Amino acid sequence: MEEIRIQGDKSSFNAWLTGSLAWALPGAGHFLQGHLVRGGVLGGSVFCIYFIGWLLGGHLYGLHNASEMGFLAYVFGFCDLGSGLLYLLSLVANIAVLDHSQLATSEYGDRFLMVAGLLNYLCMLDAFDIAVGRKK
């Protein structure tokens, strides 16, 4: 009987560790695998988008303001959570937590923060796929 081989027989634990590290610190999953340029570009993009969102007066969504926003706070909070430690450190340091609706650019800032998280989710999946062997 012919053996069926699944593409990517690398360690599942290492793949999950790489994916978790890629979520926590944007670009770190690619650095861990030796893809320095890709990790620098992707991680730098997430950091820059997050920083621009903060400068534009954006604020983070999540459980801390769910009573004000309702269900959308959870959806937007999931997007923001994708930024990993940037999100968690911002909450702890009370950075980008308050709503600056008096600023004309605050809505743009909110979207920049969300896009940074969503882009980091894609980077995390890319690092995971490389670690599993589905992508080079």
Image: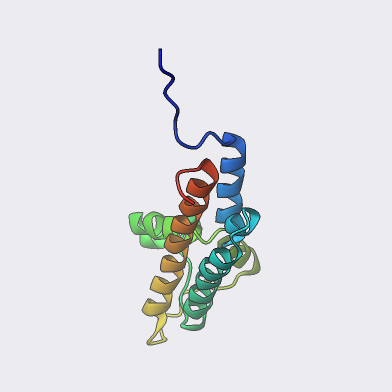
Which quadrant, please, contains the N terminus?
top left
Residue 121, above or below 12: below
Q: Is residue 116 left or right of residue 33?
A: left
Farthest residue, direction top: 1
Residue at 46% across, 83% down: 56
Residue 42 in view in this figure: yes
Q: How many marks?
A: 0
The percent position of residue 48, horizontal first and vertical second, equals 52, 76
Residue at 47% across, 81% down: 57
Farthest residue, direction front: 2
Residue 66 in view in this figure: no
Residue at 57% across, 35% down: 12
Farthest residue, direction left: 71
State how the image is colored.
Answer: rainbow
Residue at 59% across, 48% down: 18
Q: Is residue 31 left or right of residue 122?
A: right
The percent position of residue 117, horizontal first and vertical second, equals 46, 62
Residue 53, above or below 46: below
The percent position of residue 98, horizontal first and vertical second, equals 51, 73
Residue 127, above or below 134: below
Query: Nearest the camera: 72 or 9?
Result: 9
Query: Nearest the camera: 96 or 85?
Result: 85
The percent position of residue 103, horizontal first and vertical second, equals 42, 86
